[in-house]
Amino acid sequence: MNVVELEIFSLYKSALLDYLNGGGEHALRWAYEFGRRALAKEIRSIDLIASHQETLEELLANVSSKEESVRLTQSATYFLMESLSSFEMTFRGYREAIATLQQSEERYRRLIDTARDVIYTLTTEGIIKSLNPVFETITGWARTDWIGKPFMPLIHPDDLPLALGIHSFVLSGQTPPVFDLRICAFDGGYRVTEITTVPEIYQGKVIGTFGIARDITERKETQDQLKKLAKRVLDAQEEERRRLARELHDDLCQWLSGMKLTIGMVEESVSADKKSSAKLRKIKDQINDRIVEVRSLSTLLRPPALDDFGISVAMERYCDDYSKIYELQISFDKDGTDRVHYPTEIEIAFYRILQEALSNVVKHSHAHAVLVSLKEKGSSLGLEISDDGIGIPSEPVKQKPTNGHGFGLISMRERAELLGGTFHLVSTAGKGTMIHIDIPLPSNDI
């Protein structure tokens, strides 16, 4: 028996004797208090009863009459019951807590089992601890095929580095953003899942990971189909632009040039008639203006430099022309882009994005200077356009445009994402706007 127990039992014995000797309600209140203390000190109820029995036996040894023995025994029993009431209340609360916990576990289990998403847990070593029934519906595997086994063989080989990196990240106690993984199905195919995962913590220590995986295969297929459709539309538009540009340049410009020559010959034949000659000269000047306009329109539709000299030269020329027309200081940096040509769809995307971005600068930013940078960075081609204007909110890129605003930003984002690229916009009020686009280069083009 330790010191704490000796102290409790000694106090209990004193209070019991006080009560039996007429201590009344005051001593009885101490009975409950000693029971509470014994419970707090983790003294077992059976030990408290044993101490009570020992004290009672000592008292009864000095009692001669049977009536006195019965009275003391009954009073002591009442005192003991009061002392044990703390234990009873605690036990009752424990039973209620257990019942509530069991009900909560049952509700949780029903929720897990009827969920439409895969719910899983992994050990720190990546062993699958649990899977809910929908795993079988989505993948075709039986849960028993995978519980107790590493999760790695379930992941598409190309996605495995991402999966392992995120698993380690979560085990460090952090929560990553939602991410996609391809999961192997029983039929040999793969299901695309959108995964949310958090650390599983027990007593302040990370013991594994908890995750929810939503099957988004059909959504991804629909998105891919829409992207292919959008790309076909853009390709058709570009082809139509090319055709119109060629017709404007080759047919209309040549016809106008021919008309100018014809008028020049007529002008020579009527040189004596100053009035007629002046009229013809005026018509010739108007034709010259139209030729310039048609050539400018043809260049906007499809710049010849893009096909002849590649994206770097085409963009640099466009920046120079735009700078002169709008009296805007535009610097062009093409470090790291020594190649003449990149894949056509990437060149077109970057050229159209540049057109849209500079148009936005002139219309909205009130900028004085713009920096355009085109750089090849290993496996991708990057374009950055920054100005010193008044800045713009980033919301138009994320929300539906209203009253015609935001279409330009959305079209730039869509052009980049259609080619698997990324679009980032950073803008600060009064400090300008920066747009950065990265588009991956095909592996055979790196």
Image (tube, rainbow, N blue to C red):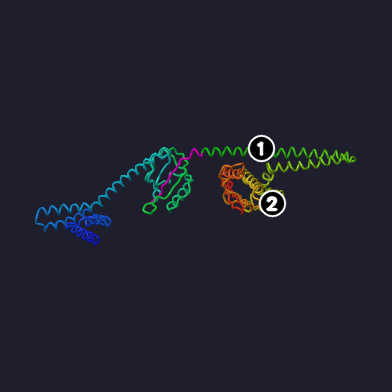
Q: Position of residue 151 (x, y in %)?
A: 41, 46
Q: Can you say whether 141 is above or below 28 in the image? A: above
Residue 328 shows which numbered tag?
A: 2
Residue count near mark 2 (Cα–Cα under 10 Å), binned few <14, some 14–19, many ≥20: some
Say what secondary structure mark 2 lies in: loop
Disc 1 element: helix
Label 2 – label 1 distance at C-alpha = 31 Å
**Secondary structure mostly taken by the magenta-highlighted segment of the chain:** strand
Q: Amino acid at mark 1?
A: Glu
Q: Is residue 236 visible?
A: yes
Residue 391 point in image, percent of width and height: 61, 51
As rendered, which of 189 and 3 lies closer to the eye? 3
Image mark for residue 174: none
**Residue 85 pos. (x, y %):** 24, 51
Q: Is residue 272 left or right of residue 213?
A: right
Residue numbers of the magenta segment: 207-220
Q: Quadrant of residue 136?
A: top left
Image quarter hosting the N terminus: bottom left
- Give whichever of 212, 21 is nearer the camera: 21
Q: Residue 296 is drawn in which quadrant? A: top right
> Magenta segment: does it hold 213?
yes
Classed neighbour count for the residue bearing mark 1: other residues with Cα under 10 Å, few (<14), some (14–19), many (≥20):
some
Assess whether residue 426 is covered by the magenta stretch. no
Q: Which residue is mark 1?
A: 240
Q: Is residue 301 above or below residue 383?
A: above
Judge from the rendering whether residue 44 lies leftward or rightward of residue 63; answer left or right.
right
Q: Is residue 346 left or right of residue 13?
A: right
Q: For the residue marked with disc 2, what is the amino acid?
A: Leu
